[in-house]
């Protein structure tokens, strides 16, 4: 199983988001919920201020006891005040958690919706660059990191700022010199936190890359489980998964090493400050420079400073994670589709001329050195057309270009006599029904899969489309009929049933153009004939393009094009090609011989 190169290895994605990008991404969301944030942070600051009052009450009680100027009733009043403050703190703490943490969840939802909507607008080249695992990592881990940074990260930062400033102010009011001595170790904490945070950013970017690789490998393995079991590759895949898991665990351990240093350093700084207070503050109490109550209050305030000091490291951790993830998300949002999309629909489009015109169409894949298609000149007005050729001749590429999956230069492809780059992508695609060789099916009911293009259609319309695709008889044999759940990628269905289900989906949309890209290859010849007869009566005045190597099916089309190495080798009717084209004649003779021997494709 060839692994798609991880786009996360792009070094640009490891960069922290720029200020302008951060402003564009987050500021509108903060403005939308500004009142929620104002009330939330007001409650948070009030909680901090109330907690700072408690040491003052303790000082009053201690000084009263040491001077014997407070009685039991006075102590009761102080205790009652502390309890009342505690109850108010509990209520306000719930308020700020609900408002601020709730905001972080709303912000996460908004960014996820924007990111998901942006991904849906991207073209095939984007999905060739970014694997599903990459994108799932952005929609999962990265958004969680952003949510934490904009939730608990902001709370811890604001809490640490208010608590530290207020606590230091109270400490200065007690004794400025003692405060200076207690805060002497602070610069060491600031410098070490800055150094460690820089390393944390790089290591966390590696964690996200490893997570994307692990997710993509898991997804591709589960989707290919039948193939893996058929080739007895369980142990091999398990070993590869184990290696990826070890790499992911190692990356997380490297992050934990940095995180494990930040908090102990903050505690060490707090302990050093406490040592200063115990020695120098104790001497001040002995010399009666400060009261015993001041000394106890000072220690309490210093304990309150330990959390902000520890929060410096934690906030730095959350901020680095959040900024790293925001940078990765913004990198995706900055990606632009290579397909031109004109939002304005030109006037004068004739609904009776909804066909294609190819004029010297040449196309080369981004990673290829030679064109997949070269100088293609074809006309597809209303009618039934067949396209055939050897593997790699460009048949599927042509279908992808017609359905506007890849960009083309101006003047190469026309739709309804209009240059395709002048038309909205949605307009072109909304007129095309497309059936691929491997139709995409969802883990839902049969009816829901057929209704994909027209979710509002009735059951009668669904059944009629299924009948036209010769799949109705198979469906009613299931216990739950059209309500049968078909499993991931239609695992409960045979290959032919999946293709006919995809055809029924396209027929239900009833669009003026139908492209079948080898979409009946898994259907036996007899069923294929029934399918064609079922849909032919609905194809009047429509453009139908059928890509196939099945002569029986091609013989029922109006004109057949044979591609060879990306160019048009020849065109003609079935009878004409039998006469003048050796490849077509060889295909015909071989398939007729197989049919005579009773060899048909599996249903």
Image: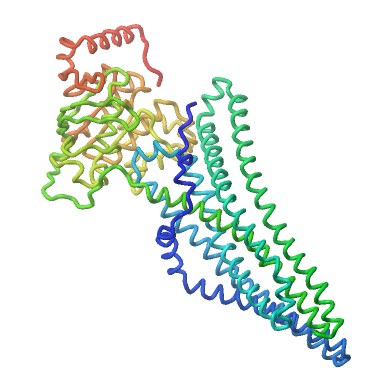
Residue located at (49% from left, 47% from top): 14
Looking at the picture, does residue 368 appear above or below residue 201?
above
Residue located at (58% from left, 68% from top): 98
Classify residue 107 as left or right of residue 303.
left
Residue located at (65% from left, 72% from top): 164
Q: Looking at the picture, how far across and down is residue 110, in whole percent?
A: 45, 59
Residue located at (49% from left, 40% from top): 133
Q: Nearer the viewer, residue 205 or 187?
A: 187
Q: Is residue 507 visible?
A: no
Q: Looking at the picture, how far across and down is residue 27, in whole percent?
A: 43, 65
Q: Looking at the picture, how far across and down is residue 45, in whole percent?
A: 60, 76
Classify residue 439 as left or right of residue 511.
right
Q: Nearer the viewer, residue 36 or 515?
A: 36
Residue 353: image quadrant is top left
Q: Nearer the viewer, residue 101 or 573?
A: 101
Q: Nearer the viewer, residue 270 or 482?
A: 270
| Residue farthest along the bottom direction in this orientation | 69
- Quadrant of the image containing the C terminus: top left
């Amino acid at each position: 199983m060839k692994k798609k190169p991880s786009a996360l290895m792009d070094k640009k994605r490891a960069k922290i988001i720029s200020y302008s990008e951060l402003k564009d991404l987050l500021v509108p969301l903060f403005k939308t919920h500004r009142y929620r944030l104002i009330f939330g942070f007001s409650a948070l600051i009030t909680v901090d201020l109330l907690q700072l009052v408690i040491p003052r009450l303790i000082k009053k009680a201690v000084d009263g006891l040491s001077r014997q100027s407070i009685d039991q009733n006075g102590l009761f009043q102080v205790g009652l005040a502390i309890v009342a403050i505690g109850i108010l703190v509990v209520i306000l703490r719930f308020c700020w958690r609900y408002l601020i943490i709730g905001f972080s969840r709303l912000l996460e939802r908004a960014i996820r919706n924007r990111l998901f909507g942006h991904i849906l607008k991207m073209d095939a080249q984007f999905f060739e660059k970014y694997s599903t695992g990459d994108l799932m990592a952005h929609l999962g881990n990265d958004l969680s990191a952003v949510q934490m940074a904009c939730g608990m990260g902001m709370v811890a930062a604001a809490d640490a700022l208010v608590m530290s400033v207020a606590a230091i102010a109270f400490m200065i009011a007690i004794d400025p010199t003692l405060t200076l001595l207690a805060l002497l170790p602070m610069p060491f904490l600031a410098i070490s936190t800055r150094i460690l945070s820089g390393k944390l950013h790089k290591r966390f970017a590696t964690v996200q890359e490893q997570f994307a690789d692990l997710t993509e490998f898991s997804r591709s393995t589960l989707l290919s489980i039948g193939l893996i079991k058929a080739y007895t590759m369980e142990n091999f895949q398990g070993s590869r998964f184990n290696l990826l898991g070890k790499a992911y665990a190692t990356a997380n351990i490297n992050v934990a090493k940095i995180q494990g240093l930040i908090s102990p350093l903050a505690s060490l700084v707090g302990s050093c400050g406490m040592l200063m207070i115990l020695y120098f503050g104790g001497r001040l109490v002995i010399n009666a420079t400060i009261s015993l109550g001041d000394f106890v209050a000072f220690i309490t305030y210093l304990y309150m400073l330990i959390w902000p000091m520890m929060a410096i490291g934690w906030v730095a951790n959350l901020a680095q994670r959040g900024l790293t993830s925001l940078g990765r998300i913004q990198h995706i949002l900055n990606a632009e589709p290579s397909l031109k999309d004109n939002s304005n629909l030109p006037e004068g489009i004739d609904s009776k001329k909804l066909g294609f015109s190819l004029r010297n169409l040449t196309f080369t894949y981004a990673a290829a050195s030679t064109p997949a298609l070269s100088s293609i000149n074809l006309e597809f007005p209303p009618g039934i057309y067949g396209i055939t050729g050897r593997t790699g001749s460009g048949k599927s590429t042509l279908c992808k270009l017609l359905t506007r999956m890849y960009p083309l230069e101006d003047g190469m492809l026309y739709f309804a006599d209009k240059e395709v780059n002048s038309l909205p992508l949605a307009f072109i695609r909304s007129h095309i029904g497309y059936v691929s060789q491997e139709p995409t099916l969802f883990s839902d009911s049969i009816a829901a899969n057929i209704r994909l293009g027209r979710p509002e259609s009735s059951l009668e319309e669904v059944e009629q489309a299924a009948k036209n695709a010769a799949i109705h008889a198979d469906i009613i044999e299931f216990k739950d009929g059209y309500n049968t759940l078909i499993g991931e990628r239609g695992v409960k269905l045979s290959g032919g049933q999946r293709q006919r289900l995809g055809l029924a989906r396209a027929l239900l949309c009833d669009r003026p153009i139908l492209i079948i890209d080898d979409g009946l290859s898994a259907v036996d010849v007899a069923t294929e004939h029934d399918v064609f007869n079922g849909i032919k009566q609905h194809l009047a005045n429509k453009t139908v393009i059928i890509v196939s190597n099945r002569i029986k099916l091609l013989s029922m089309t109006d004109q057949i094009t044979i591609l060879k190495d990306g160019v048009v080798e020849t065109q003609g009717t079935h009878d004409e090609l039998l006469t003048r084209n050796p490849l077509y004649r060889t295909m015909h003779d071989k398939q007729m011989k197989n049919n005579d021997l009773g060899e048909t494709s599996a249903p």
